[in-house]
């Protein structure tokens, strides 16, 4: 895809192995995403505004990404010294695969609606048959909403100036929840 000179790759990973009972483990990881968002925000705050950025967020990685961008917008609004993210000149793309994020994240009154001003392109790969995402509504006892990666969202929630694509990978991936399943699909990788 053209000149890749100067390309830098950052892989932000955290322990995701199951620790204890499934529901308790899921709730712990869900809560931890908010803290991890601060760490990622600090890293992102060091990036020059004209530098293109592509986020590939799988499962809770999508929530961490949105939390990080949201934290940067808050810091920018408060006048703290961070690299600007609101209407930044560098191309910013989100590629979310089976995102463990609430399905109304980008809705008109959604919690991450404001992050859309930072995004030039949003590519969403959902799995309507994913067994893990099917229970996302149990992770937060107060909201009880489904996962974006399980139900998807309407195009109208994203402004016309943001390129948007969505696909349901259920027929390709099946009911399992694992990033390697998506990576093995030539069809999904071309997207």
Image (tube, grey):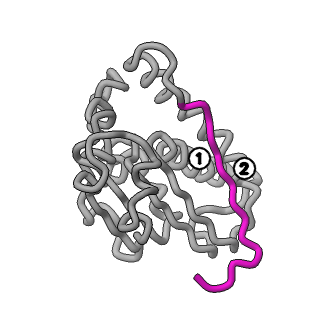
Give coordinates of residue 98: x percent, y percent: 37, 48
Q: Residue furthest bottom?
A: 2
Q: Which quadrant, please, contains the N terminus?
A: bottom right
Give coordinates of residue 12: x percent, y percent: 64, 46
Which residue shows up at 48% across the image and 71% down it? Answer: 120
Label 1: which residue?
A: 68
Query: Which mark is first along the chain, 1 or 2?
Result: 2
Which residue shows up at 54% across the image and 42% down it? Answer: 64
| Above or below, 36 relative to 18 | below
Label 2: which residue?
A: 43
- Secondary structure, magenta segment, majority class: loop
Give coordinates of residue 122: x percent, y percent: 42, 65
Q: Are marks 2 and 1 in contact (CB under 8 Å)?
A: yes
Classed neighbour count for the residue bearing mark 2: other residues with Cα under 10 Å, few (<14), some (14–19), many (≥20): few
Which residue shows up at 55% across the image and 28% down it? Answer: 32
| Above or below, 44 relative to 90 | above
Q: CA distance from mark 2 to mark 1?
A: 9 Å
Which residue range is magenta in the image?
1-16
Instruction: Name the image quarter holding residue 175.
Output: top left
């Amino acid at each position: 895809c053209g000149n890749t000179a100067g390309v830098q790759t950052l892989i932000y990973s955290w322990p995701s192995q199951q620790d204890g009972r499934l529901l308790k483990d899921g709730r712990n990881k869900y809560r931890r995403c908010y803290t991890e968002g601060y760490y990622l925000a600090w890293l992102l705050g060091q990036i020059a505004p004209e530098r293109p950025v592509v986020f590939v967020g799988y499962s809770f990685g999508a929530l961490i990404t949105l939390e990080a961008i949201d934290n940067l917008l808050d810091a920018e609004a408060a006048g703290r010294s961070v690299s600007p993210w609101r209407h930044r000149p560098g191309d910013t793309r989100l590629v979310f695969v089976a995102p463990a994020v609430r399905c109304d994240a980008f809705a008109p009154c959604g919690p991450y609606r404001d992050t859309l001003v930072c995004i030039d392109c949003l590519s969403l790969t959902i799995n309507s048959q994913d067994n893990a995402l099917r229970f996302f509504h149990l992770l937060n006892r107060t909201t009880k909403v489904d996962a974006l990666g399980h139900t998807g969202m309407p195009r109208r929630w994203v402004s016309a100036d943001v390129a948007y694509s969505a696909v349901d990978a259920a027929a390709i991936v099946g009911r399992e929840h694992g990033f390697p399943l998506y990576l093995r699909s030539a069809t999904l990788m071309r997207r």
